Image (tube, rainbow, N blue to C red):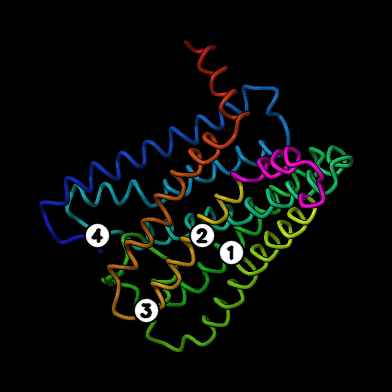
């Protein structure tokens, strides 16, 4: 489904989404280059930030290029294999975003609540292990969605009320009994939504409790500034995800759901590098050093 039926708005949308996509890719690539080229940023926090930037590039690349081509060609057709591929990649990277944000919250919890043991706890082996587990859980989520979609036998010449192959919209196309699919969806929501969000909430509860015990105002500000950017990204990610979920639950509002999905899949990955670069002094200094090396 296109975002608008007005032909005069098509060129505007084409330029807008092409610009958003290029800004997102460039911004996240700069974060990755800054972290990898600056030895001061070779820490667990910035390692996970570079992983998050890479995932955001992949996340937006699963939906935005196809949407841009559809606007350019005035066509919204996708093949069966293409749809399954897009849905699988979308499920992997949206889940990876979720998992990495949870891991980053745990990293900030250890850094602030157990600063003397931080280097011992967050060692390279654990960082690699947490990243690998996040990817494997995301792959499992994608495969479970695939198994549910492959059970739909009437998947031909169907209209999807979204600008991409959204798993939740694809499952609604089934004309058979969906009780088992609903059970799996609720299970996935708990495992990949409620548990990570609860872990983030618990981490920040302990972080805030530790910060309030710091006697000096400057110490409190310094401690909170190390996790302020992450907290902003978490609020943006889960806030837009909740908006998409609520809009999909409202009947007869496919256009509103599509707009909410645009914010979730396109705008959120674009804002992440700006949040980290504008609020983080280390990233800004690393970008300046990278700029001076190149030019």
Name the side, left or right, on which 291 lies relative to 67. right
Residue at the location (50% across, 54% down)?
236
Give the foreground label among 1 and 3: 3
Quadrant location of the N terminus? bottom left
Q: Are marks 4 and 2 in contact (CB under 8 Å)?
A: no
Give the foreground label among 2 and 3: 3
Residue 250 lies, with reference to residue 290, above or below; the image says below
Dot 1 or dot 3: first in sequence order is 1
Give the CA distance from mark 1 to mark 4.
28 Å
Dot 4 or dot 3: first in sequence order is 4
237 is within the stretch colored magenta: no
Q: Are marks 1 and 4 in contact (CB under 8 Å)?
A: no
Which residue was labeled with disc 3?
250
Which residue was labeled with disc 1?
141
Dot 1 or dot 4: first in sequence order is 4
Residue at the location (51% across, 59% down)?
91
Q: Main secondary structure of the magenta part?
A: helix
Q: Tell me the magenta residue range.
A: 211-229
């Amino acid at each position: 489904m296109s975002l608008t039926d007005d032909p005069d708005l098509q060129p505007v949308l084409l330029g807008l989404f092409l610009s958003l996509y290029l800004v997102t890719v460039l911004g996240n690539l700069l974060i990755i280059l800054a972290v990898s080229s600056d030895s001061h940023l070779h820490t667990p926090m910035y390692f996970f930030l570079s992983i998050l930037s890479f995932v955001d590039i992949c996340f937006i690349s699963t939906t935005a290029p196809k949407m841009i081509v559809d606007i350019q060609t005035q066509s919204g057709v996708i093949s069966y294999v293409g749809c399954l591929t897009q849905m699988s990649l979308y499920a992997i990277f949206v889940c990876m975003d979720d998992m990495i944000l949870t891991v980053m919250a745990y990293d900030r919890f250890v850094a602030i609540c157990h600063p003397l043991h931080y280097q011992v706890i967050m060692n390279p082996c654990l960082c690699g292990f947490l990243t690998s587990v996040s990817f494997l859980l995301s792959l499992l989520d994608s495969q479970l969605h695939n198994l549910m979609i492959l059970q739909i036998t009437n998947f031909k010449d169907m209209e999807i009320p979204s600008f991409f192959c959204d798993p939740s919209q694809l499952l609604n196309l089934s004309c058979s009994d969906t009780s088992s699919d609903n059970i799996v969806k609720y299970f996935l929501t708990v495992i990949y939504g409620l548990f990570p969000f609860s872990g983030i909430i618990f981490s920040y509860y302990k972080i805030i409790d530790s910060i309030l015990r710091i006697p000096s105002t400057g110490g409190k500000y310094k401690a909170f500034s190390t996790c302020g950017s992450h907290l902003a990204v978490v609020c943006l990610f889960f806030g837009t995800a909740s908006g998409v979920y609520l809009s999909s639950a409202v009947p007869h509002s496919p256009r509103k759901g599509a707009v909410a999905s645009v914010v979730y899949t396109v705008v959120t990955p674009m804002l992440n590098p700006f949040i980290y670069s504008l609020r983080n002094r280390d990233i800004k200094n690393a970008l300046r050093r990278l700029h001076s090396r190149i030019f």
